[in-house]
Image (cartoon, grey):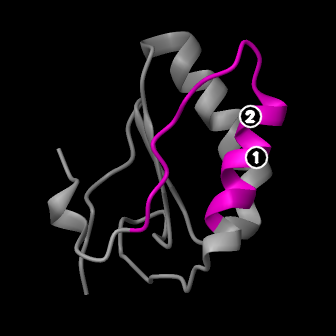
Amino acid sequence: MINFGKESEILEFKKSTSELNEAIVSIVAMLNKSGKGKILFGVKNNGDGVGQQLTENTLRDISRRVAADIKPPIYPSIYELANPWNHWG
């Protein structure tokens, strides 16, 4: 099991995409404070990765919700981490 460390002002964990509403609130808060941030789905609050099965539709739905709910618009990178260490940093 991978542990992603601790949440911070620019990093937040969500156990699943069912927490998308909360994630959007967190994105806005991070952008307002720091101008950047990361949300990782499939990770418990303690940093333990639990994973989540995603489809292309799920990724598109996340992108659409972010575009619809955050104004002015932002252009996030949304991707599935097959190997999380490829994009970590």
The amino acid type, in three-letter code, at marker 1 is Arg
Quadrant in which the N terminus is drawn = bottom left
Toward the viewer: 54 or 8? 54
Q: For this view, does 34 lie left or right of residue 18?
A: left
Residue 66: % across, % down: 71, 39
Judge whether residue 65 is colored magenta. Answer: yes
Image disc number at residue 79? none
Q: Are marks 2 and 1 in contact (CB under 8 Å)?
A: yes
Task: Count how many numbered circles sit on residues in the image.
Answer: 2
Local secondary structure at mark 2: helix
Residue 30 vs residue 46, the one in the foreground:
30
Q: Which residues are magenta?
A: 59-80
Residue ranking furthest to the right? 68
Residue 57's image quarter? Answer: bottom right
Seen at 34% across and 69% down, the residue is: 81
Where is mark 2, residue-wise? 67
- The residue that appears at 43% across and 32% down in the rendered structure is 37
| Residue drawn at the location 37% of the way across and 77% of the way down | 49
Q: Secondary structure at mark 1?
A: helix
Q: Quadrant of residue 35?
A: top left
Residue 57 covered by magenta stretch: no
Q: Is residue 57 above or below residue 28?
A: below
Q: Is residue 27 left or right of residue 19?
A: left
Residue 82 drawn at (x, y percent): 30, 77
Q: Amino acid at mark 2?
A: Ala
Placement of 25 over or under 87, stated as above or below: above
- Label 1 packing within 10 angstroms: few (<14), some (14-19), many (20+): few
Pointer 1: what residue?
Answer: 64
**Residues under labels 2 and 1: Cα distance?**
5 Å
